[in-house]
Amino acid sequence: MSDVKKEAWEYNQVELLLLGFSPILIATNSFSNALVLASATTVTLILSTGLAFFFKKIISPEIKLLSLLIIISFSTTITELLAQAYTFEHSIILESFFPLIATNFIILIKMEKVLKNNNTSLQMLHAAKIGLIGFLILLPLGFIRELVGTGELFSNMDLFWSPAAIESKFTAPQFFNPLIIITLPSGAFIFCGLLLAIYNLIRSKIHKS
Amino acid sequence: MRHLRKVLFNITALIFIIIFCGGLLVATLYNTNSRIQKEANQYEEKALLGILSPYSFTNSIVEERITIPVNTNAGIEEGSKAYLGKQNQKIIAILLPITAKEGYSGEIKMLVGISSKREILGIKILSHRETAGLGDKIEKDKSDWITRFKGRSLKNTDLNAWDVEKNGGDFDQLTGATITSRSIIIATRRVLNYVEDNYEALFKP
């Protein structure tokens, strides 16, 4: 019994990632939003870890925190500009959420690892992995939230490519009553909590056997 | 001495980081500026075309703007520029930015789209300070009240009809927001008068 308890409180990679993405979770209430935010987080990640690596030799322990913060704020601003240039309408919809990417402590952790370790290619690979996992977390979230919360799917995809993409919009049949709470911030966390509960259940079952 | 050297080194390092990152930011700004401008224009144009639907134009609305005669009584302030919608070389619709001054809590800024036939094509509320839940229903996404002005002109609605139903007019008032409704109705009527008086200057410059 105490073994199972111990494992349940074990350090959990996925939970850590989820915590880091918390502010972004609020805004991923549709598939297209999730796509934009996940891409923005990945771009910021790559930029900041790249810059951290670039400045590695001149950052001494005393100025480490300050320089990391400088790097991440510049990276976030650059990402925001890129988002405005390539996904203008979404950058208006998600206006207040791009700066919040800077609060994703996962990015800070990765930058610190880059500064500490000498095996930089491995670090860059890890950073790319986090970016990818970001997509894997946020896209299904946006997908389900849009589907269950509003009964529609892919409603803003025409903003990415041609207006013809509006055909890919899927609307649920009339009898389907959307669960609006899932599109609100609380819904994001409810849904994540459910996901984590399922994940932990499966994990503890695997450990038991 | 050693300590001082370290501090100086750190300060220089920080300054270098800031300058380099700043340079990167400036480079990005420079590169994306034209693209962002273009997208912003497209966005604005899409929003404006929404007011003037179902008309479509052969020109780009955001690019052609003319300075129009000032008439503060009609709500046309100093320096207002109208948007022009053309079909080939003829102007078939204009968007006028006006300020309705007798709102319940202050000025209401709006864009009124008028066709060359002197009919209202649509109204868009840009800013207001009306009461939330009552007066803010003049916004299109809160209620469709503002769409009831479409098609109205001085010909099909005579002077006395430009008022709220309570006062014998043609227009339904918003519940609990009679003053707000009335200010929009009157401002619209004034703009139509303004267009009547300045037709040549607006549609045949």
Image (tube, rainbow, N blue to C red):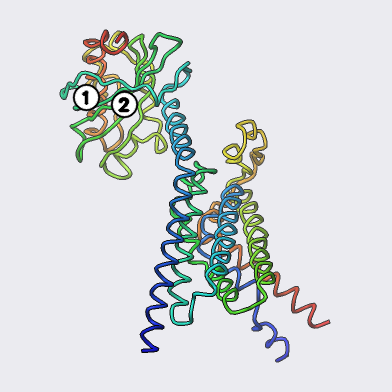
Q: Residue at x 53, y 55 (%)?
A: A181
Q: Nearer the viewer, residue A15 or A201?
A: A15
Q: What residue appears at the point 52 percent right and 70 percent down from the top-left corner? A: A55
Q: Which mark is residue A81?
A: none
- Where does label 1 land, which residue? B76
Pick the front one: B142 or A84: A84
Chain designation of label 1: B
Horizontal arrangement in the rendering, residue B99 relative to residue A106 (left or right): left
Q: Quadrant of residue A198?
A: bottom right
Subunit bearing disc 2: B
Q: Nearer the viewer, residue A140 or A164?
A: A164
Residue assigned mark 2: B172
Residue A134, image x and y in percent? 63, 61
Kind of residue sitting beneath label 2: Asp
Residue B6 location (% of width, % of height)? 41, 83
In the image, residue A102 sits, relative to residue A5, either above or below, namely above
* Residue A178 image position (x, y, % from top left): 59, 48
Mark 1 or mark 2, which is nearer to you? Answer: 1
Circle 1 residues within 10 Å: few <14, some 14–19, many ≥20: many
